[in-house]
Amino acid sequence: MTGLDKIINEIKEESDQTTADILKNGRDKASEITAAAEKETAAAEKEITDKAEATVKQIRQRAADGADLIKKRAVLAAKQEIISETLEAAKQKLYQLSDSDYADFLKKLIVKNADAGEGVIAIGSLDTKRLPGDFVNQVNTALSDGKTVKAAEKPADIGHGVILSYEGAAENLSIDELFAAKKDELTDIVKGILF
């Protein structure tokens, strides 16, 4: 082998070695990039999965909360309906009292709400035939000293109960008004009994 062949061989071997080193470095760099990309991909997948699971959990919680709210509203509506029906039944029971018991009830109501002086009682249009002819006298007998009532010339513009008037001031003692005024109190009583 001549000196030139030897130099060419050395250059070729050196070139082969440099090419091998470059290829090895390139493969190592490609492996590093691939490993980093896989690591980033795994982290991104975990982040996306975690976010998706959190979103699903929130949606499920909102759905459960919504269902609970709907259930509570339905229960509340049912309770309110039962309370209204109970109060209406109580009112009907009052209307169904015997005429004498109903007259006693109205008499006590008037006595409880009467002021000093002379008042005027206008009886509800549905009650005029139920009350005895001497109803106003019975009320006056039950009133304390200084209090009297007289009958109005015409029935009150209410169904059941009376309107009690004193010099321009009138108190609505209709059954409907009494129940409306005491609705909260009566509702609490009914709730205590039923629930």
Image: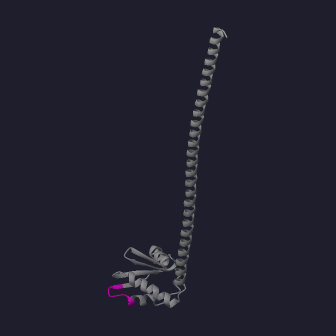
Q: Is residue 37 left or right of residue 136?
A: right
Q: Position of residue 187 (x, y in %)?
A: 48, 75
Residue 150 pos. (x, y %): 41, 84
Pick whichever, 77 or 37, lies toward us: 37
Q: Nearer the viewer, residue 2 or 103?
A: 2
Q: Is residue 63 magenta?
A: no
Q: Pick the residue in front: 155 or 7.
A: 7
Percent position of residue 138, x then y: 42, 90
Q: Residue at x 41, y 76 (%)?
A: 171
How far from the left and from the top, in percent, is residue 68? 55, 63
Residue visible at 32% across and 85% down in the picture: 146
In the image, residue 157 sits, relative to residue 43, either above or below, namely below
Between 178 and 8, the one lying in front of the other is 8
Evaluate whether residue 132 shows in this view.
Answer: no
In the image as oriented, which residue stretches furthest toward the front?
A: 1
Q: Which residues are magenta?
A: 141-147
Quarter of the image holding residue 89?
bottom right
Residue 112 at least partly seen = yes
Name above or below for residue 37 compared with residue 23: below
Location of residue 43 with respect to 124 vertically, above or below: above
